[in-house]
Image (tube, coloured by chain):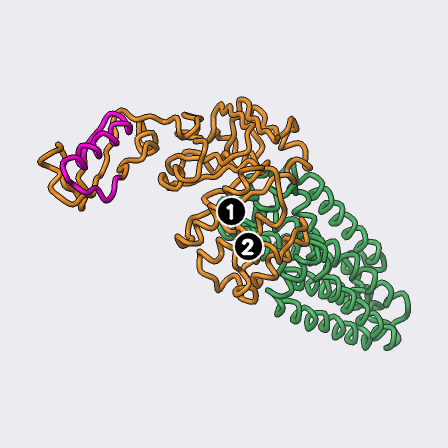
Chain colours: A orange, B green
Amino acid sequence: MPSLQLTGVNSGYNGFDVLRDINLSVTEPSIYVVLGPNGAGKTTLLRTIAGILEPHRGTVSFDGQDVYKTRETRKRMSYLSHLNALPEEMTVQEALDFYASIEGGDVARVMQTLQLAPLGEMKVSKLSQGQKKRVSIAKTLLNERDLYLLDEPTSNLDPAMAKEVRDLLLEFSKRKIVLYSSHNLFEAKEIGRYLVLIKGGTLRFFERIENLRMATYRVGIKARGDVSKILDAQLENGYYVLTVKSPDEVGEIVKRLVNQGIMVTEVKELDNPLESLFTEGS
Amino acid sequence: MSFNRAIAKRGMRLGLLYVVLSFFLAGLGIVFSVAGSFLPADLNTNGSPVDVNAYISLLPVPIVGIAGLMAATPVSLLFVHDKENGTLEYLLSMGFDQRDVFRAYLAASLMLGLPSLVVGGAASGIVALALGRGLDVAGTILVCSLALGIAVVALVTVLMSAFTALQRQPMGMNQPLGIAIGAFVLVGALMAPLAAGSLALVFELVISAIVAAISLSLLAMTPTLIRREKMLP
């Protein structure tokens, strides 16, 4: 099993520490969502793990090998920058061939996976931002790696393609470690098994997402009939909204409504537990 | 295709006009070679310390050097482009270090610069020989054009890349400083025959050797001189 260790890492630019005293141990193949406000240090964290930046202090090791000092270790990783890193004057096919000429890989396979065949002869400069992102992801997937470092991989993608990419990463994550930075709390909750929260350059939270607990939960219920006579709920955007202390209470509430002859058509959690974690103390 | 060749091909595609114009500039070397061939052999009999014959004969050398620089310029411009679009960052993530990156762009510069240096130097030498200037003059033109041209292209490429990486301003605003320094070296080579007379060949080769040594030293010291974050957008 691949393992990633960060020990007392300070890292940044021009001698200035953006990240401070980061300790992180990742030993299980899975998707680790790196979350944090703008400027928190997410990109710096991914760049440091990728060996692009040399830590000012501490070490980053992958399977016991210092990432910065051993080139072979870096070749076991794949890094997707939030920039696309594509030669704009090339066609999509040429751009992927260009990177394959450096690191090898199966261009035909990634073009098929990312549905790039219709764009193959188009110049990168003529592509939309979403299309460029797809090519950039394809470049990152040219070779199978043990560690994927992906900086906002679904930004600029349309919802259908974003889902395709998430599904692809979920498949990878059964065997590989995927670190995935995102601003999107709902996406993070949907795809991530672990949450790595960075704020102000420090690691604030590293835990399984399912272990996140909130003091209260807001639940929205769609029903045929006037729920407000039975429950203390406010009608908001077509949902009767009520606050409960635990998701376990929801079953009892639905049962009460059904017993009163009200047909419940939808129940959903309105708040994301990541949201409070994200905004707390920022 | 090797990475170096891929960079050279990209440079050629982006700056084809530079490459085409460099051959016209190299052709100017031939013009000076022809002009030198028509000078009377007794130009310096009036006691002047300036060896006008040597000066005119070797004029093709810096001209061909400028042609080489012009042909190689697209690669330096490509370096700016690749820094800004994150390609250099991606190369670092693939296991390259700063020296690998600089070396690749340098090799690509030389690939683009060499044809005009070889064509310009050889054609100027052959013309001089054909017009009766002697094998020594023809050989001097060819050897000096190649030696100085390669050295200057190397120096300017390394300097332009370094200025691009080190500057705070975006989009390669300081990059042309590299060309300015290269032009300074070429002007030195232009003036050398005036000062050195019959020793011009030695003088030009010494300048070439010094410039080449500086380029290689800078390249070797790249990881120390230029931190990795300087390669990022």
Tag 2 near tag 1, CB within 8 Å = yes
Is residue B104 shown in magenta? Answer: no
Counting from the top left corner in percent of width and height, residue B86 is at: 53, 49
Residue at figure coordinates x 61%, y 61% from the top left: A94
Magenta-colored span: A242-267
**Which residue is painted at 34% across and 29% down in the image?**
A277
Amino acid residing under circle 2: Thr
Q: Which chain carries label 2?
A: A
Circle 1 residue: A168
Counting residues from the start of the chain, the first of labels 2 and 1 encountered is: 2
Give the residue at x 75% y 67%: B60
Instruction: Report the front residue among A103 and B180.
Output: A103
The residues tagged by marks 2 and 1 sit, at their Cα atoms, a distance apart of 9 Å
Task: Identify the image quadrant of the N terminus of chain A.
Answer: top right
Count residues near mark 1 (Cα–Cα under 10 Å), then give few for <14, some for 14-19, many for 20+. Answer: few
> Which amino acid type corresponds to the residue marked 1 in the rendered image?
Leu
Answer yes or no: is residue B156 visible. no
- Residue holding disc 2: A113
Locate residue B143: give its quadrant.
bottom right
